[in-house]
Amino acid sequence: MHLTTKRFQEVINQPSRKFSWSGKLYLRDGETIDFTDKEILKGTGYIQRSCSGSSELELGSVYASEFGLSLFTNMDRYRLERAQISLRYHLHFDDGNQESIPMGIFEVSEANRSKKRLELKGYDFMLRFDRPISISETFGTAFELLTFICERCRVQLGMSEAQVLILPNGTEMLSIYPEHDIETYRDLLHYLASTLGSVALIDRYGRLVLKQYGITPVTLIEAKHRFDSSVSDFKTYYTAINSTNMKTKLAEYYALEQDTGLTMNLGVNPFMQLGLTEKRERMCQRLLEAVSQISYTPFDATTIGNPSLDPADMIVHLYEREAVQGLITNIEYKINGKHRISGVGKNPNYAQSKSKHDKNLVGILNKIESEHLIVHSYSNSKAFDLSTEEIPIIRIDFASDKETEALFNASILLDVRTSTVENKKQVSLLPITSGSDPPVESIMYEMIEEKEVPTKVIVTFILNHERIDYHVPIETYSNGQHVLNLFHPLSNLQEKTMNSFSVMMCLESGNVHIEKDHAIAAISGQSLGTTEVWDGKLEMTEWWSKVTLNQGMLYQRKLLEGFQIGLHQPQANIFDESVSRYVPNGLALRGWKESVSTEVENV
């Protein structure tokens, strides 16, 4: 539940209250646009948040929140590409004051224009974690792993180290084994949240937080606060967990002495596979302690609305003076409308008999048969002179027949010519005299010393047209010849796809020359197929030098120039053409005559 004042909670539960909504649009060009209730089409605004599925409680869920609304505006919808929107709820008090709470920050994914309004739809920052993961093994504390995930996906972490340590298994050193099914950072976040007995959410400020299911009610919802509701006739509670051990290929069963409730299936968790058997048992027992504290009654209700409520909050419904606890797993805020909250859960009385084997997870692991190691090599066919602008030095296109991994290695011979700067300094010298000569004053001389400025080479990797900005090698060289060695792992290569890996290089100062065949590289791995047939796509890189206008060209008051790119069927032509051009003020350019011969060669 979002932290509010006591006065806010008193007024929000009154039969009559005055409130309003507002928001801000943050465009990619830096412009900020404010809007209020007047610009929102009535009945179109909503915010949906979830922390579990539609039938059963889950641990480690990573659901994204969604928003949608229509604005009366003439704004060009194309300006909203990659835009962000923040929404706020304002509760007005009788004395004229108001209390505002944030309702979330979202990224616009769809913007559709109708005649008079702009329809927007988007999701919170949870989708940023849908990036292919570049590692196969890692270890660290839970806080270190959360920080690592947030830095890679550019999402702020909304928890301190102390808040992570109090979570179940928050003090354990965690690691993952290389054979796992983690493909994205969102998968990694799912397993990490499950290990910590919590769910992953993006809070109202756009930060990642891990939250445990609430066990203490945060508010009371009476009959006068509900429009309609339905409550189950059973309580959902857990007395056991099921976790699969990949070493033994068995689903281990941990339960309380009074095992009468549901069993929460944790499946295969890569963070709970390595280490001693005692460590795995200790971690599972902590999760069992956390899960066994959950007890609630599933429900579904439409209420007058309390925007401070969040998923995973425990609330109390009052039915004919009977207090019934409910756990919110899904909540939908209607802008200027009703709010709908629900809590899903299964009936322990109809739960199937528990077994130590999970039919979905127990069995033989699918092993990939060994294959030959395939190497795609590269060597530069022309020389390069590096500058302050990035230029592609290496590019390798390759196909992956299966989901696989590969390694990139390169060795580049650099001919470095550093620049120098003059350093002037004053030096005091005494002339040579004999002992009988009278003392003389020192003579000041100005000395000029040339100081070498080291050359810094910056390397950027690009995989499938996406810059790898978390690993940018930088090397500093002195004058002479040097060897630059590069390495980068290529993880989660998709099945039956073409891949492209490029190396871009630039300088901060100095000059670097790479001779022909001095940049050699290779990508090696299994299940790497040969390149497919040409698909008709051309990729070109061209540099245009600056055009300097001299005084003679200024006589031409209108200087127009352009170029076109297109397909042309070559034909054998021989032509002879004479061109003369005259310009104002009596100046004439000499006519010239040029003969060009072209021929078509069959390839």
Image (cartoon, grey):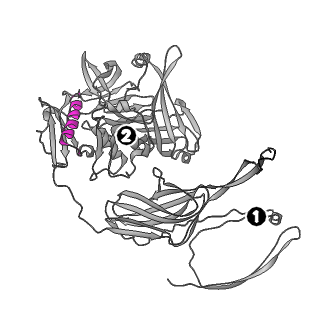
Residue found at the far right of this picture: 586
Mark 2 nearby-residue class (10 Å; few <14, some 14–19, many ≥20): some
- Residue 71 placement (x, y as % from top left): 52, 37
Question: Relative to the observer, which residue lies in front, 35 or 593?
Answer: 593
Q: Secondary structure at mark 2?
A: helix
194 lies above or below 217: below
User: Which numbered disc, 1 or 2, marks the residue closer to the eye?
Assistant: 2
What's under tag 2, amino acid-wise? Glu
Task: Say which residue appears at 12% left-offset and 39% top-offset.
Answer: 354
Quadrant for residue 331, please give it. top left
Classify residue 432 as left or right of residue 453.
Answer: right
Q: Secondary structure at mark 1?
A: loop
Task: Say which residue appears at 76% left-offset and 64% top-offset.
Answer: 559
Where does label 2 land, which residue?
A: 144
292 is within the stretch colored magenta:
yes
Magenta span: 273-296
What's under tag 1, amino acid-wise? Leu
506 lies above or below 18: below
Classify residue 280 as left or right of residue 480.
Answer: left
601 lies above or below 97: below
- Residue 27 placement (x, y as % from top left): 55, 42
Q: CA distance from mark 1 to mark 2?
A: 60 Å
599 lies above or below 525: below
Where does label 1 land, which residue?
A: 559
Disc nearer the start of the sequence (1/2):
2
Classify residue 148 as left or right of residue 385.
Answer: left
Residue found at the far top of this picture: 95
Residue 242, disc: none
